[in-house]
Amino acid sequence: MKYIGTSLIKNKKAFKIIFLLILIGFIMGFLLYKKIDNTSLLNEIKDIKTYLNTYHINFIVLHLIYLMILIIFSFTFLGLILFPLYLIYESITITYNILSFINIYHFNGLIYSLIYNILTKAIFVILVLYLFKNMINFLKNLLLFLKNKTDNKALESIIKHFRNIIFIIIIAFINDLIIYLFLHNILAKLTFILY
């Protein structure tokens, strides 16, 4: 029971940090939205149904690039900086997307953009957070190993980290493949919400 209480306290701290990073991203996204000329993006959003019926949503290559960069840095202490920056970046893009839909479609745009972002971004962001959590555990064990060379925990941590990386890549690829093959049709059908 004491372990569960300690674990919850640690997770509360992590949730507070994640919430703070997301809040920073939302504020930056709002400020960026107000500063940038959105005309071309707003025109594309007005034709979202045509776009979704014509093109597939393809995050496969982009997400693989993001994952490769994050994975490479997950073996270094630079990952401690890069992961929070990525979370802020995602928060900025989600905010920008939501505000763009609200600008054109008002409340209906809010509903649709929330559905769009949940279906297209939620799983990938959760996978990145999972990778970040594993990176922190890996780096802790690596520090312990460097202090005490006889500790086998570092080797176990490296193996576990590689397994988690493979798991994350596979799930991210499957998720992006589902988005590519099916979700553009679902999102195109859900555009009735906008009108």
Image (cartoon, rainbow, N blue to C red):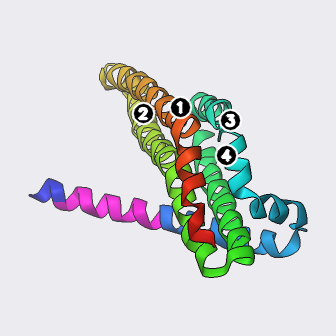
Q: Earlier in the sequence, mark 3 or mark 2?
A: 3
Q: Which residue is mark 1?
A: 177
The residues tagged by marks 2 and 1 sit, at their Cα atoms, a distance apart of 29 Å
Residue 62 marker: 3
Up-down: is 162 above or below 11?
above
Q: Earlier in the sequence, mark 1 or mark 3?
A: 3
Counting residues from the start of the chain, the first of labels 4 and 2 encountered is 4
**Residue lying at 49% horizontally and 28% vertically, measured from the top left:** 169
Question: With 148 as the anchor, is 113 left or right in this view?
Answer: right
> Looking at the magenta stretch, what is its main secondary structure?
helix
Give left or right: position of 71 versus 102. left
**Over which residues does the magenta segment extend?**
5-17
**Mark found first going from the N terminus, 1 or 4:** 4
> Callout 1: helix, strand or loop?
helix
Which residue is denoted by mark 4 in the rendering? 53
Q: Element under label 4? A: helix
Circle 3 or circle 4, nearest the eye: 4
Separation of marks 3 and 2 at Cα, in angstroms: 25 Å
Identify the image quadrant of residue 130. top left
Question: Which residue carries the number 2 mark?
Answer: 138
Q: Are marks 2 and 1 in contact (CB under 8 Å)?
A: no
